[in-house]
Image (cartoon, rainbow, N blue to C red):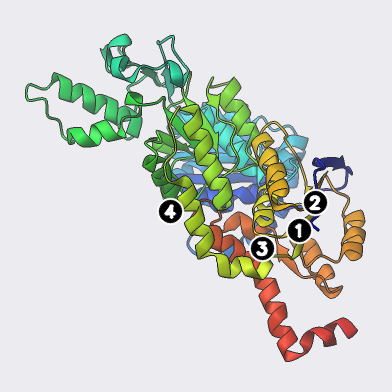
Amino acid sequence: MSTTFSEALTFECETGNYHTFCPISCVAWLYQKIEDSFFLVVGTKTCGYFLQNALGVMIFAEPRYAMAELEEGDISAQLNDYKELKRLCLQIKQDRNPSVIVWIGTCTTEIIKMDLEGMAPRLEAEIAIPIVVARANGLDYAFTQGEDTVLAAMAHRCPTIQSSTKKSLPNDIDSTNANSSTSLIVENGQGESRKVGNKVLLDSDTNTLLRPENSLVSNLLQRATNQNSPTGVGTASPSLNSRMDPLNAHPPLVLFGSLPSSVATQLTLELQRQGITVSGWLPSQRYTDLPSLGEGVYVCGVNPFLSRTATTLMRRRKCKLIGAPFPIGPDGTRCWIEKICSVFNILPKGLKERESSVWQGIEDYVALVRGKSVFFMGDNLLEVSLARFLVRCGMIVYEVGIPYMDKRFQAAELALLESTCREMNVPMPRIVEKPDNYHQVQRIRELQPDLAITGMAHANPLEARGISTKWSVEFTFAQIHGFTNARDILELVTRPLRRNESLEGLGWTSLVQSN
């Protein structure tokens, strides 16, 4: 006789300490993603030691970040911060010549109230390099929120696309009459303008012609060139233009979240299979290719820790947010694509078959975790998405600890977790915000889960007590998004389980437990 679990998700808050990395660690993956950037962390020697030791093992090439160390003289306001930062930025320009310099403000800059936002525009004008200020300091809840702060700051630097059409919803757009209903005006610094298509594009910072590298802008300009050309043929083929121009079928779509270029390409291609063109990514691979934002532009996130960026895109840049589950695991990726398709009134094709084939391909890993239990202590804000995926794999999730929960931004993910638990007929996990680690360790000792996903600080103590662990930070740096990377998630999850099976075969497990 089967038991039916129908209770809803329960949320608790223990107001415990945050045992996570410092958010300045975001430079470890952001400088690799934004290839023409340079990150300058403004902090004390402690910040430099952290970057050198904690991130040194993750660097396989010469990094594009540095420390601007604050000495005792700086803290007592006896030195000129502006002159020192100018000297460092001029040296960076001479040595690296980046397209953008990102100042990462640490806790110390908050305490001594350094006016980084005030100094940046003045210095930017002097050295002729954009300077973006991000307060990615230890006052945040999780280290992944450093990326959230940087992307929110970069969102203000994106070009502006202003729509003159009154019809904004996808179902109100008549694709057949799109070119005749409205016009697109591209302005330059002399006040000249050109009509191109059916949107208004304007760079809000420089009031100059938008960069042709942007796929949306280049396609619009190319289409205008083809229309004005005597032969009707431009530099690109008409078939390519018609396929890449999103305005013929749906409004512009911008995805935000830092992913490896290969993973971003995979998600872009998955949407293209459904007839959806991605106008750009935030961040882009190059700072000079930032996407155009504004009214009529739809945005969708790929990571659950980007709530500040989502708020900035909606309130400051007037974009429309698509609230979808996050593309982690085959189930999450399918729901993510389906949600985007539903917003644009597009009927998804072949998604269920695509998801089914992925599940068949990872069945050997799923068999290892089916029926096992897992406990999330909370570290990187990916816990809800990973828990939902592991429930779909057949695992029982006792508790989901999370340093910070934005229920609005993760509403679709929480709903998918709840429906997944009902479909799999397993109990709903407890969701504990800001967990008290002492109480969590007590619950782990009582529940004896097969696996605990935790921060590095608690891994060894739990292992000494016979609990298999996995560092949660590994999921941050691994490729876990999209259909094709589901196997990598299970590779990380099953590694300690497979190790224990190997030790049991050698007789080591009983020896360790007895000691």
Q: CA distance from mark 1 to mark 4?
A: 32 Å
Question: What's the mark number on residue 404?
Answer: none
What's the residue at 55%, 62% (across, down)? 488
From the viewer's side, name the closer residue of 42 and 455: 455
Point out the residue furthest to the left here.
231
Q: CA distance from mark 2 to mark 4?
A: 36 Å
Question: What's the mark number on residue 262?
Answer: 4
From the viewer's side, name the closer residue of 329 and 95: 329
Point out the residue furthest to the front here.
1
- Of the two numbered discs 1 and 3 in the rendering, the one whose residue sits closer to the viewer: 1
Report the residue marked by disc 2. Answer: 427
For the residue labelled by badge 1, is the local secondary structure a helix, a strand or a loop? strand
Of the 4 image quadrants, the one containing the C terminus is: bottom right
Q: CA distance from mark 3 to mark 2?
A: 41 Å
Q: As displayed, is residue 58 above or below residue 499?
A: above
Specify whether residue 35 is in view: no
Q: Amino acid at mark 4?
A: Ser
Of the 4 image quadrants, the one containing the N terminus is: bottom right
Q: CA distance from mark 3 to mark 4?
A: 28 Å
Q: Amino acid at mark 3?
A: Asn
In the displayed structure image, the side of residue 207 where residue 50 appears, left or right: right
Check contact, mark 3 vs mark 2: CB within 8 A: no
Question: What's the mark number on residue 396?
Answer: 1
Q: Amino acid at mark 1?
A: Ile
Q: Amino acid at mark 2?
A: Pro
How packed mark 4 is, by other alpha carbons closer than 10 Å (few <14, some 14-19, many 20 or more), is: few
